[in-house]
Structure formats: C-alpha cells, structure tokens
Image (cartoon, rainbow, N blue to C red):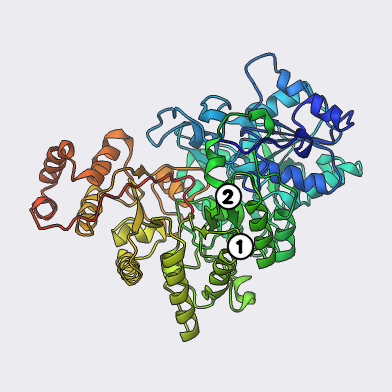
Amino acid sequence: MNSPEIRKEYFLPTSKDEMERLGWDQADIILFSGDAYVDHPSFGTAVIGRVLQRAGFKVAIVPQPNWRDDLRDFKKLGKPRLFFGVSAGAMDSMVNHYTANKRLRHDDAYTPGGRHGMRPDYPVIVYSKILKELYPDVPVIAGGIEASLRRVSHYDYWEDRLRPSILADAPADMISYGMGEKTVLEIASRLDKRENIKDMTDIPQTAFFTEEKPVSGDIILSSFEECLKDKRLQSLNFKKIEEESNRYNGNVIWQSTKGRMIKINPMYPPLVEEEIDSFYNLPFTRVPHPRYKGKTIPAYEMIRHSITLHRGCFGGCVFCTISAHQGKFISSRSKESILKETKKVTEMADFKGYISDLGGPSANMYALRGKDESICKKCLRPSCLHPGVCKNLNVDHSRLTDIYQSVDRLPAIKKSFVGSGVRYDLAMASSTEKEAKANERYIEELIKNHVSGRLKVAPEHTSDKVLGIMRKPAFSLFRKFKNKFEQINRRHNLNQQIIPYFISSHPGCETADMAELAIETKELDFHLEQVQDFTPTPMTLASEIYYSGIHPYTGEKIYTARGELEKQKQRQFFFWYKPEFKKRIEQELKRMGRFDLLKRLFQPRPVKRTGNVSLLHNNTNHKN
C-alpha cells in the first residue's frame, strides 16, 4: 500500500482547488499524462514537473484524464500561460495495452489498482487533438516514450502497417524526444520571453514540421510515401537514424511526410555529473499523490525504495529502445548524490531497511566511458559490446563496487539489492590486469551481498547465429558466468538462483534454433515457465527487420516468425518438460526431419534437480 499521507501542497497541483490553495489564478504549464501521478524520480512527468518548478514556473499535472466524457478533465485547470505538455506515460501505450499476441491486457501497472482502460490507445494523438480543439492558440509539446520513439516513420506492430511520424496524426507543435529536462526548460524559457513556438527551430532533441530547408551536412531520409512503396528505403532510413542517435554530435535529420518537412534536431551532449545530480536532488516526496489514498499503483510498488545510478546504455541490443531514447553515452550521478537520495529513502515511513535496486538501464554501466573520449566522439558503432567489448572502453567496475559498499555502510541500511539486469559480458571483460581484478571484486560483491535470492541476466538465446543478430555475446559466456555464480555461492554457503531471460520468435530465429535452446537449457537444468515472444516496438532494429525482412546494415534477408501459429511453434520449446507440450514438439521435430534433436531433447538422463526457475520477460521494459 501507499505510504502515510503527505499533504497535497507538497505535490504539484492536480486540481483547481489545489491551485487555489497555492494562490494561483493560472498555471504556466499543464502536463497531461497517461500514468497516475507519482512524485518519484522514476516517473518522467514528475521529473519534468519538478525541473520546471525549480526554474520558477507554475506547473500543474492532469494524470490519466478522461477522454470519453464531456472532457471536463481537459478544461478543469483552464488555459496555461505558456504551453500544454502531453505524454502517454512511461510506456508506449500499445505495449502497455496489448500482449505480443495482440491480445488486450487486463491490467495496467501505472494505474491505481492496476485498473485497465484509464488511457486510450495512442494518448499523444488523443490528448493533443482534444487540447488543440479546446485551446487552438496554446502550444502543445509532446514528450515521453511514445512521442520520442515515433518521431519518424515507423512500423506499428499492432496495426501491422508503416505509420508516419506521430506529428502527422497528433497536432502537437513540437516533440521533445529523449530525456526531456533540458529541452523542456529551453522551450519554457523562450516561450516565457514571448518567442513564438514556430520560430524555435534550433532547440536540440526536438522534432517539428517546418518551412525551413535542409542545409549541407544534414541527413535527408527517404520520405514516408517512398517508404510505403519500398520497404528497403524504410530499412535504410533506420540505419541512418540509429547512427545519428549514437553520435556524440549528431546531424539534423529531415523527412518529408504528407507533403511537409519534419526537422529533427540532434540530441544534447550527454549530461555531466552536476546536471544529472541536479535532477535527482529535486524535492520529490517519493510517493503517489494523496488522490490515490488506499489504492496501490503496481509500478510504484516495484521501485518505491530503488535508486537510479545512471542513464544511457551502450549495449545496442537490437530489440531495445534505451539508446534511442536515453542515448548511448552513460551519464552517472555522483556518489554524494546517490548517498543523499539513499538517506532520504531511509527516512520514508514504510522503509524497512532494504533498497530494492541500485541500478539503471543496465545495472553495471555506472561511470563507464571511453578511455580516449575523442575516439568515442567520432564513433558510429551502435554497440560498445558487440561483436566484442570495445578496446577503448574503460570497463573497471571499481566505482560501482564502492557505491554498493558505501550504501550498505549507512546505519539504516540492512541490505541493498541489484534488481536491474546485469550485463555479464561487461562484468567479465577486461583489457588490463587492474581491470580484471576490479571486475572480479565487483562480481564477488554483487553475488555475495546484493542478490535477493535471484540474479537477473539476459542471454536471450542460445544460438550464436541469433545472438549475433541481437548483438548479444555467445551463449558460452553465459555458461562461464553461471559457473562463476555457482562457485561464489558455494564459497559463501548461499542458495541463490540465476534467472536467465530468453526471447522466442526473434528475427533470425528458426524453429530448430528453439529446439537447440530447449536442449541447452535442459542441460543446465532450467525449467522455463514464463517467457516472452519477440514484440516489435517502434524504433528498434529488430522491428525494422520484422517489417522489411531485411537487415538495415547488411541488406541480407532475415527470416522472422510471423502469425500466431509460427510463433507458437517456437514458443512451445520453452515448455518441453511439460507433458501437454511433448507430443506437439515431437510431431514438429519429426516433420522437420530432425530426429537428432528429438533424441537429444527427450532421451532420459539422470538429473540432479536444483529447483524450478520461473522466468518473466517483458521485452519493452527489458534493459539488457
């Protein structure tokens, strides 16, 4: 349940009454969100609101407005002085609403009580249209995951079609893509100086329709209409977009859409330590707004006592959107900022002594960067870890180990855990003896002191062919890490499990690859119970392969399972040990003529049971 109630005036106002208590006649900025309002640094709307508040702006929030009635939620706070902000929330709404099989989900983790149906499909479009109809002269700025990752033409799995930039459907004046603190501050400051939103064509991390023309050095994509006619052009577009997103200093990108030009300005340089510290040092109450009294918000329950150490991810996994949204370069908080937030967590009324996660998009990328950053600034490589760990990458985990130990030395801390996924290939990498020793100490510290019974890692598959497409390391490395994990457990008399995550039906994966996965995991004594089919999400390389059938970097045709029957043929191999699946699997392997795999999978062998492993994999939230 939620913490004891904190007075409403400590939150950003969500009603006219709360505004009046603060003495406001009008808000400067009103933020509409598809999520419930939780005043915690893990919830984007709260962060944006607090950043603007610190800059002196009057900010109000309308969480989960009702779009089906007389639109009173869109009218209740009136007209803001500067702009409306709209966001679908912490997830793309279609991922939030539908499973990989396109079936409607029955719950919503970002809604009180987990109740489904509190946001529409495509809230950015729905909210923007309503606000523009009610207040046509007020700028609307779209942000968050949904707007960010749909800023150019993109494949929509749920509609099974190529969609144009969300700007073509949502009448927003501008998209603030990526992590939006600096962008939204710039927009607010310039609107406050009475600058017209149409004239703000130079702000980094923004996308908008414009009458401007490209200049030398800009990247001009194939138009949306050209991509509709030729999937190869959409595939080539993605390659250019990913390369520019991973640049330290990117170029302006243009795309013609429905007869108009969209301009996409490059990202800001990575946040420096002082900047990211300033965002996490804001006066968050760390709890849901009192309007939800007595109701549980599942997503909050998972992170209420967690600490984010850094942003960004240089893993470059082809099914993940982290680098497209947060960037490839790591921005890390200072030790002082992390400890300050941890102390604040220990003062929460419901704190019992346990930090649930000291993590980030990937748990162990804290403070890692290039040894020679001038090389990084020229690099176009989408992953620093594939096909092998970059020789210019400093992989020394010493600072992270120190963070773990420093947090645990705080008087109120009984134990801190690492709940985010760990990149074991990164933890086991080294180019010097010093790095090797530092990383051995990190792995020992992690497994001995920071695993809450189960350590999450993500091999994703066992086939090196599939793993190569995924930009993941060979499965043999997972075996080495598992052995190390078990050795450390034995050394310290611990009874912990390693929880590997796997995906079926990923581009490049065939039914025989899934049979091999079943055999490999059987040999490791894993019984996989909850798994995830690959779900194509906007702005991932894997989604582009799924849509076009072509690898954007090589032009190679790539097989991908499509349709429920093809996907089920792959998915069933996760459950080879269940009697109800055995007959179907046998029939499929016989049909394929793979009697060798049939024999290896089902021939009896003595097995020493170590307990079942239950795996829950959500491809959208997955960070590794």
Q: Which residue is mark 1?
A: 411
Looking at the image, residue 530 sits to the left or right of residue 292; the answer is left
Outermost residue to the right: 193
Say which quadrant the N terminus sits in.
top right
Tell me where residue 429 appears, x and y as whole percent: 44, 74
The residue singled out by tag 2 in the image is 305
Residue drawn 36% across the image and 61% down it: 468
Secondary structure at badge 2 equals loop
Q: Earlier in the sequence, mark 1 or mark 2?
A: 2
Image position of 355 (left or right of 469): right
Q: Is residue 72 visible?
A: yes
> Is residue 195 in view from this perspective?
no
Alpha carbon of mark 1 to alpha carbon of mark 2: how far?
A: 16 Å
Q: Nearer the viewer, residue 308 or 161?
A: 308
Relative vertical location of residue 578 with respect to residue 526 in this rendering, above or below? above
Q: Give the residue type that dot 1 points to.
A: Pro
Label 1 Cα crowd, 10 Å radius (few <14 / some 14-19 / many 20+): few
Amino acid type of the residue that numbered disc 2 sits on in the rendered structure:
His
Residue drawn 75% across the image and 35% down it? 7
User: Which one is in front, 477 or 613?
Assistant: 613
Of helix, strand and loop, which one carries label 1? loop
Instruction: Measuring from the top left, give residue 325's x and y in whole percent.
Output: 59, 51
